[in-house]
Every structure is written in structure tokens, then in C-alpha cells.
Image: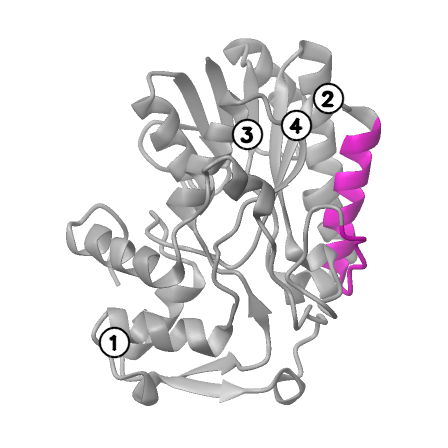
Amino acid sequence: MRALVIGGSGQIGGHLLEGLRADGHAAVGTYATSPAPGLVQLALDDDAAVEAALGDVRPDVVFLPAGWTWVDANEDDPARSRRENLEAPLRVARHCRDQGALFVTYSTDYVFDGAAGPYAEEDPPRPLSVYGRAKLELEEALARELPGQHLLLRSTTVFGPERQGKNFVYQLLRRAAKGERMVVPSDQWATPSYGPDVARATLALVDRGARGVWHVAGPDVMDRVALARLACRVFGIDPDRCVEPRTTAELKQKAARPLRGGLRTDRLQALGLGLRGAEEALRAMKAEVEAGRAAPI
């Protein structure tokens, strides 16, 4: 299989490239602003460059894990949110359609309102934020324009070892290492998802010919404080010293969050592709960091 991973310097993109190459596939990865060895630069908003990249690689599958995921900033700049989370991915998808490649991309539990999560694939979406609405519009456009030629994976609260070390767990542990406390929402529930497992399940679904919307998320339903405290304990840090719980109302975040969020993964688990639970995943992350195979804390 020939594959193009747009956003190969990011968390999921890096794990996708690693998995593809480990399985013997010919995989090309790109970056936009964070260069890394073996990656080529590609601006997602440069449509001619994207089309040329597809023509050069001639991929069977194009993976697009890149996106603008800063939820509160999306609220401040809805035009940019649409450009980066809807319009640019849709242009890539159309090139895939024209060239006969499968298009694989990612969405989020923020397409739901958080009134009754965790959610199954068939539950009706109702996004509360600019970010969630852009993601839902992309989902709807792909279903309309690329039926049978796309795979969309919803995930949430992705963490784990990565090259850039930007995810929630990294942020928490780095603050703790400096003796700083991190304010963490106590009433936002989700299903934390281990990045390497999200990539592994993605590749397995592609191999099995899956199409349409699939949920790829962890099995544990927990709030952010519980995840933060668990991460501290696994990494040998006193959680009372570094985790400061606050309610969402107290935080006054710009974008509304789905408080009872998270994703059900019954379909994924029926295939034997379920992700590891949070504690096992955090222990795996610790081992990767200590072995120098990921960004340090």
C-alpha cells in the first residue's frame, strides 16, 4: 500500500507513519510548521501543492490527522476554523475522490452536546462550539460527496508519547516538574484515548475495508481530574501537589464543552480492536518516555 500522511509531525500522524512503515508500506509524511527528519513540507491551504503531492505519491490511502484543535481559539476565529477544519480537508478529500484514493480523517466527541454521553456512532450530533460545528460539517460533506470512499474516526482526549510533547498529559507533568499546579476541569467527562492505539486501530480498520464513521477511543469514562490524578500517580508525582480542580462554570472557557462527552466503541471492540485503558496506557507512555523514544517530560 502507498500512503500519504498529511500532518506526519503531529501526535496521531507520527504514530500512523511508524505503524505503516513497520508493516512494510510505502508511506510519505508531511509537516506544515514543525519539521522532522524524513518529512516533507506541505501547506494544507496550498491546494495546488496538495494536488501535486497526491500526483507524486500516487497514494492508495491519504491520512489527514492534521487540524486546528485549539477549541477556544476556534471560538474567536470562526473563519479560520472553517478554513482549517472544513474547507481544506474537504479539498484534499475531493482530490482523493478524483484520483481514486481512500480518504481517512478524524473528528471528535465535540460534535455532540454532552447531555448524555458517551455516544455511539448513530447518536444524533448537536455541537455546542465553533470547532464542533466545523467538524460536523466536514462529516456531513464527506458523507455527501465521498460515499464509500472515506473513513472518519471520531476520537477524544488523545494522549501518549509524541515527538512534540503537546498533549494534556505532557502539559500536566511538565508543570508538575516545575512545581506548578494545573487547573483542571472537574466536570468534563470523556473517554481518554491512547495515541498509538488510535493509530493502530485506524490502520486495522483500513485493512478491513471499513468505511464511514467509526469511534476509536479508550474504554474508561472519566473526568479530566481523574485522568490528571492517575497520570500523576503513574509518573510518581503527588497529585494533590499539582492538580487543582475547578468546575467548567468557574473556568469560564470561551467555547462550550460537552460535559458528559466521550465515545462508545462497541463496534470497534466487536472486531477485537479496542484500545487500552487509561492506566495501562499511561504506564506504556512512561516506558516510552523513559526509553527516550518520545519527547521528554
Task: Please tell me which residue is depicted at 40% across the width and 74% down the height of the picture.
Answer: 228
Kind of element beneath mark 4: loop
Residue 142 % position (x, y): 76, 32
Q: Mark 4 highlights which residue?
A: 211
Whichever of callouts 1 and 3 sits on the residue coming sooner in the sequence is 3
Are dots 4 and 2 in contact, CB under 8 Å?
yes
Residue lying at the far left in this picture: please name it. 291
Estimate the spatial distance between the alpha carbons at disc 1 and disc 2, rounded to whole Å.
48 Å
Disc nearest the viewer among 1 and 3: 3
Query: How many residues crowd mark 4 within 10 Å: few (<14), some (14–19), many (20+)?
Result: some
Label 1 – label 3 distance at C-alpha: 35 Å
Instruction: Write down the residue under mark 1.
Output: 177
Label 4 to label 2: alpha-carbon separation: 6 Å
Magenta range: 123-144
Residue at 74% in and 42% down: 86
Which residue was labeled with disc 3?
A: 63
- What amino acid is found at the position of numbered circle 3 in the picture? Phe
Residue that mark 2 sits on: 148
Q: Quadrant of the C terminus?
A: bottom left
Residue 61, disc: none
Amino acid at circle 2: Gly
Q: Secondary structure at mark 2?
A: loop
Q: CA distance from mark 4 to mark 1?
A: 43 Å
Q: Between disc 4 and disc 2, whose residue precedes?
A: 2
